[in-house]
Structure formats: C-alpha cells, structure tokens
Image: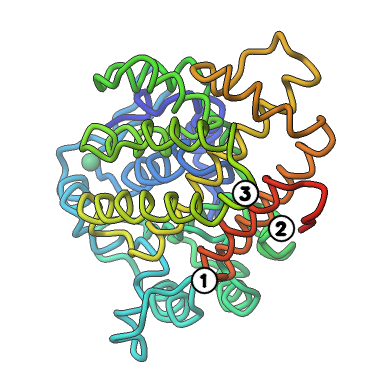
C-alpha cells in the first residue's frame, strides 16, 4: 500500500510529506480523528518510510522502497525497530498473563512495551517507531507514565499516538505532540468503496450513511454482511418494530436485539481473531445504538426539514410513523440519551439493562425519563 491509496486524507499526508522532505519529522505525533478513517494505515506507512533504508522520492513525495531489508521485515511484521502498542498486549506483560482483555490501556503495557523499549537504540534502521493505538482509552496514570518518554524522547524515536477523542488526552500529552487531524470520509466515497466490494446498492447506501464518515466501520459491516451476518435485515426489522411497538413490547424487542447481536458478535469473532471478544461485543452493541440514533435523526429532521434525505431512505413510511411519537426536541433529547448509553457500554453496564431502558424510554417518552 502507498500513501496515494489512503482514502481522502490528503491534508494529513501532505503535512507528513513536508516534514519528511524538510528533515523535520516530529518525535511525537497525535493522529486524531474518528474511528475507521485511515489513521492506523497512515501511521504504518509513515513508520515504514521512516525506517526504510532507500526511500524513493518522486515529485516531492517520499515513499518506502518496499525492497530493502527494513521494508521486508516491516511487511513481515518482524521489524526490530517498530513496536505497535495496544491494550491487549497486557497478556504479555509481567503480571498480565491469564487476565481478561482490558477495557482501558493498562499502565503496565505503557511501562513495559513503550517506556522500557524507548531507551534501547535501534538495531536495524536509524530510527525506532512506536504506534500507540486507542490512546483515548488511556487513564491519567497511563498517560502520566507515557509522559516520561514524551517529555524527552531520544532523537532516534518517533511515537505516534492514535486517538478518536482528543479531549480524553491530558493537556500535557497534547502539548508535547504534533497533532495531525484526520477528517471523516465523504458518504459518496464510502458508497463507491462498498459497491466495489460487490455489496448490494441499497445496503451500500445505508451503510455509507450510517457510518457517518467512518470508512473502516462501513467496510467491517460490509464484510460481515457478505459473510451472512444479516445486519441490514436486522436493521429493517428493528425499524419496523420501532415504528409500531408499544410499551409492553419493549422487553421482547430488547430480547430480539440481543439475540441478533449475539449472532453477529460470534461471526465477527470468527472473522477477526486478533480483536478481543469484549471489544467486538461492544462494537455490535454500538452498531445497534447507531441504528436507533439514525432512526431518531430521521425522525427529528422529518419534523424540521422534511425535504432532507433520510438515512433510512428505504423505510420512509416506518420512519414517518416512528417520528409521530416525538417532536424534534424530544427526538434530540433521545439522541443525547443514546450517546449516554454508548458511554454506559464503556463503563461495563449490563447490555440488557441498557437496551431495555432505552426501548422503554422510546416507547413511552412522557412517563419514563432517563
Ligand atoms: Zn525500504
């Protein structure tokens, strides 16, 4: 893969290319932006370029050569001067063996996989590059531990922090890093990508809208769908139910969601053995909440700007019926509640409680307040 193939992140790549050509690559970067917009891919290409022995420079744009020993080891995932730090590495730390996959980035991972390795000089290339994933899941003690290396990184070091929520990083972490922003991907470009994969046009269009700029999420859903996950069918059934269910049906509807969710989670775990089951389970919970949020957005907009095209363009009648339950203000409140629910998943609140609570609340806005 080359920088040219990174989708719609020209300005971020331009900043990196200019830094490279002027010989002023930073020692610490934060790649900030939504999930699934190419932050990790860009960081990997940047790492490979910094480590490459014979970089190719054409028209002011640098690229790794793909053929030197460094590039070959990088592609094989065995480069001694490249370290990917992620929370699941806890099981390889001194005290982490046999522990469940962590929700936050454990301080032990930072101490043993980053801090302890920064001081070892590079052995093959002139630099040593670290990518730290999901830094929005670092608590204060992990960040304070990491600050020790961000304060005075060795000259050969480049540390790239990937982050979906910049506000979760301490001001001291941000001030010591060069922040590069990655924007959401345009809906029509996501649609094109999904169609290229051979996904049905209606499903591609819905996923492209639901993903809200996250190409990575949309591609994950597309792969699952093509492997029989029936996400689209689940969403159609859910919107049908939302349009007509009543308060007593809420618990049963939560059951239906949870059983669909379990099937999708099992399939996703089979397809992606690298990611922890807890994370996959959360992603699927989040997907169902996103589907509900999209229906509420449609309901809200229908009441304010009816000519705007809906995310659920394929179920307008049901959305109209659903919208009749809310005025725009209540729909907006319910959307805010859904985002609170997303935080609850992160805090390990029982998923059944969350779905039941949300569906009861949507069925009877006047009597149940969250
Ligand atoms: Zn090379």
Disc 1 target residue: 104
Look at the image and tell me in which quarter the N terminus lies: top left
Q: Is residue 89 above or below residue 237?
A: below
Q: Earlier in the sequence, mark 1 or mark 2?
A: 1
Q: Is ligand 1 within 8 Å of the beta carbon of the residue shown at mark 1?
A: no
Whole-angstrom CA distance, mark 1 to mark 2, is: 22 Å
Give the side of residue 103 with respect to residue 343, left or right.
Answer: left
Residue at 21% in and 37% down: 227
Disc 2 target residue: 175
The mark found on residue 178 in the picture is 3
Q: Is ligand 1 within 8 Å of the beta carbon of the residue shown at mark 3?
A: no
Return the residue nearer the eye: 340 or 154. Answer: 340
The mark found on residue 192 in the picture is none
Q: Residues within 10 Å of mark 1 (few under 14, many from 20)?
A: some
Look at the image and tell me in which quarter the C terminus lies: bottom right
Residue at 54% in and 16% down: 313
Whole-angstrom CA distance, mark 1 to mark 3, is: 24 Å
Residue 262 percent across, percent down from the top left: 34, 56
Whole-angstrom CA distance, mark 3 to mark 2, is: 8 Å
């Amino acid at each position: 893969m080359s920088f040219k193939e990174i989708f719609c992140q020209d300005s971020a790549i331009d900043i990196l290319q200019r830094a490279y050509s002027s010989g002023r690559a930073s020692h610490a970067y934060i790649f900030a932006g939504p999930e699934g917009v190419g932050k990790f891919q860009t960081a990997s290409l940047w790492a490979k370029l910094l480590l490459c022995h014979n970089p190719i420079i054409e028209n002011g744009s640098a690229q790794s050569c793909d053929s030197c020993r460094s590039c070959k080891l990088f592609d094989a995932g065995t480069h001694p001067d490249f370290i990917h730090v992620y929370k699941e590495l806890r099981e390889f730390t001194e005290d982490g063996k046999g522990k469940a996959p962590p929700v936050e980035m454990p301080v032990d991972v930072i101490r043993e996989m980053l801090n302890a390795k920064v001081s070892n000089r590079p052995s093959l290339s002139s630099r040593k590059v670290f990518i730290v994933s999901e830094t929005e899941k670092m608590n204060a003690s992990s960040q304070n531990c990491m600050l020790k290396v961000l304060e005075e990184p060795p000259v050969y070091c480049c540390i790239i922090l990937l982050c979906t929520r910049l506000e979760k990083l301490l001001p001291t972490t941000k001030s010591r890093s060069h922040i590069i922003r990655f924007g959401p991907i345009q809906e029509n470009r996501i649609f094109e990508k999904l169609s290229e994969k051979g996904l049905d046009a209606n499903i591609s269009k819905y996923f492209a809208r639901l993903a809200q700029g996250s190409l990575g999420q949309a591609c994950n859903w597309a792969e699952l769908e093509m492997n029989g996950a029936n996400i689209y069918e689940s969403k159609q059934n859910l919107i049908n139910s939302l349009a007509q269910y009543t308060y007593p049906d809420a618990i049963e509807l939560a059951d239906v969601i949870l059983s669909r969710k379990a099937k999708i989670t099992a399939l996703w775990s089979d397809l992606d053995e690298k990611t922890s089951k807890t994370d996959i389970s959360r992603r699927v919970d989040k997907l169902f909440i996103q589907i509900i949020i999209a229906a509420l957005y449609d309901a809200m907009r229908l009441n304010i700007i009816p000519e705007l095209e809906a995310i659920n363009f394929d179920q307008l009648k049901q959305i109209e019926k659903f919208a009749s339950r809310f005025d725009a203000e209540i729909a907006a409140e319910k959307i805010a509640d859904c985002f609170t629910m997303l935080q609850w998943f992160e805090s390990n609140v029982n998923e059944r409680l969350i779905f039941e609570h949300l569906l009861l609340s949507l069925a009877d806005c006047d009597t149940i307040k969250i």
